[in-house]
Amino acid sequence: MSAATATAKVDKADGGKAEWYLMPWGPLRLVLRAFMFGARKYEPFGWQKIADAKRRYLDAAMRHIVETYEGVTEDPESKLHPLAHAGCCVLIALWYAMREAAEPKQLEAHGIKTVRPVSLASKL
């Protein structure tokens, strides 16, 4: 192989694919820790069983954001930054919004788990 061939630019057909290098991994790890905290405190994927979940998680996200504006830097129970919990809540609300906007088969085609939330009224 000549030097010219070795340095030739090779085009890779990855246009339109997810560019994961753009994600801020440090903050995402904290959001994951918030998910893990909730899974230990309640149950894994328990957030999929909450009545009126999208509204409640958006409300919770706003409470965590307001805490940050008020100077809180650590949740007293989890010891995580309130914005880690806000990020968790926003992702959950987005999950619900995506479910409302698409058929389950479309979501599953994108690797999104679809578990129907149970009605809490049926548990009373």
Image (tube, rainbow, N blue to C red):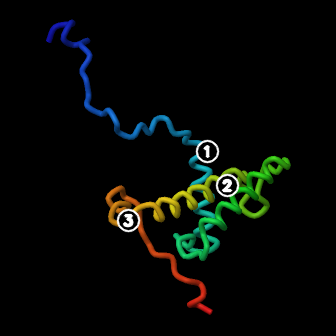
Residue at the spot of label 3: 103
Q: Nearer the viewer, mark 2 or mark 1?
A: 2
Q: Residues within 10 Å of mark 2 (few under 14, many from 20)?
A: many
Is 53 in front, or is 74?
A: 53
Residue in view at x 74 percent, y 51 percent: 65
The amino acid sitting under disc 1 is Pro
Dot 3: what SS?
loop
Q: Where residue 64 appears, x then y in whole percent?
A: 74, 56
Residue in view at x 75 percent, y 64 percent: 77
Dot 1: what SS?
helix
Is residue 114 placed above or below 123 in the rendered structure?
A: above
Residue at the spot of label 1: 27
Dot 2: what SS?
helix
The amino acid sitting under disc 3 is Glu
Residue in view at x 81 percent, y 47 percent: 69
Q: Where residue 49 appears, x then y in whole percent?
A: 55, 76
